[in-house]
Amino acid sequence: MLDEKPDQPPGSDAASRPKSASNREPVRPAGEAGGMLSRFRGGITPQGERYSWDKPLWRRILVGFLLWTGILGFGFVGLSLLAVFAIGWTGPPPTLNMAGTAMKGVEVRSTWVDLKDISPHLVRAVIASEDQNFCAHDGFDLKEIQKAMQAAENGGDLRGASTISQQTAKNVFLWNGGGWFRKGLEAWFTVNVEWMWSKPRIMETYLNIAEWGDGIYGAEQAAQERFDVSASDLTPRQAAALAAVLPSPNRWKVDGQYASGRRNTRIQSLMAMVKRDKLDACVVGP
C-alpha cells in the first residue's frame, strides 16, 4: 500500500511493462518499408519474398547483347563515314575485287588517270548503257527499280537496276555477289558516296576501278591493252565496245560479236541521245 503511487490508475503497471515477443508488431525489412515503391515491388515479387536487385541471367545476356550491338553499330557507322570521306579525298586503295582476281592467279593491271584524261565518249557510253539518269538521281534510280520489279513479276528475268553510284560503292568498299546483307551495305555506302562525293568524282572512281576482264581494271589500262590507245583517245565505237562488256567483262570480249555488233550500234545511238539531251552535263559539262 505504501509503495503504490496515488495518481497512478489501477492496472497501469501492465501498460508500463514491455510487450512480450509474441505481442510485438512485426518489423518490416528496410526494402519493404511501405509506400509506392513497396506496392510496386509487391506486384512483381512473390508474396512474402524479399525484393532482390539481382537480374535474371536472360536479362543480363539481353542487356549485354544490346550494349555490344550498339557499340559495334556506332563503331561501324563512324568508321564507314571516315572511310568514305578519306577515299573521296585520296582515291581508293586496291579493291576486294582486285584481291579476288589476284587470288585466282591472274595478274592485276591497273593505271589511274584523272577524269579529264578519259574520253567524253566513254563517259557518255557508260551513262548510255548503265545509268542514263546518273546526273538526275541521288544514288538510286527508282524508276528503273520499279521496271525491274515489274519485269520480274511478269515472269521475266530479274535484271539489274544498279546505278553507277551503287556500282562505285560496291566496287570500292564491298565485293561482287548477291545477298540482302551485301545489298544493304551497298545502299548504306551509296547514300554516303552521293553525300560526300561530287558526280565527277564518282564517275572518275568508277571508270578507274571498273573491271574489263583478264585482270584489267580501269579505263586507261583497258584502252591500252584492248585498242592500243590511251583512254583520252578512244573513239565512239571503241568506247561503246568497252561499255558493252561491263556487265560481264570476263564473259564478253570487246572484239567479240556481242560488243562489236548490234549492241555496239545501239550504245552509240544512245550516246548521241545522251549528248543531245545533256544527260552528261554533270560530268562532261558544256
Image (cartoon, grey):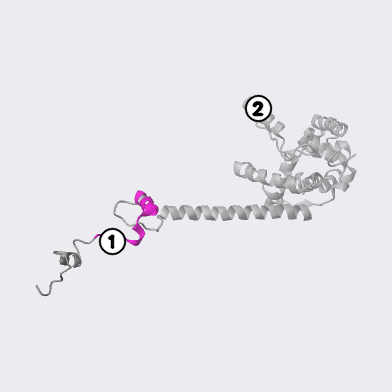
Residue 143, image x, y percentages: 71, 31
Residue placed furthest toward the top? 154
Q: Amino acid at mark 2?
A: Gln
Residue 4, image x, y percentages: 13, 71
Q: Which residues are magenta?
A: 25-43
Residue 10, image x, y percentages: 13, 64
Q: Is residue 90 magenta?
A: no
Please report the residue visible at 37 percent of the width from the left and 58 percent of the height from the top.
Answer: 52
The residue labelled by disc 2 is 150
Where is the N terminus found, in terms of image quarters? bottom left
Q: Is residue 33 magenta?
A: yes
**Mark 1 nearby-residue class (10 Å; few <14, some 14–19, many ≥20):** few
User: Residue 12, located in which quarter of the rendered image?
Assistant: bottom left
Please report the residue visible at 44 percent of the width from the left and 53 percent of the height from the top.
Answer: 59
Please tell me which residue lies in front, 134 or 219. Answer: 134
The residue labelled by disc 1 is 27
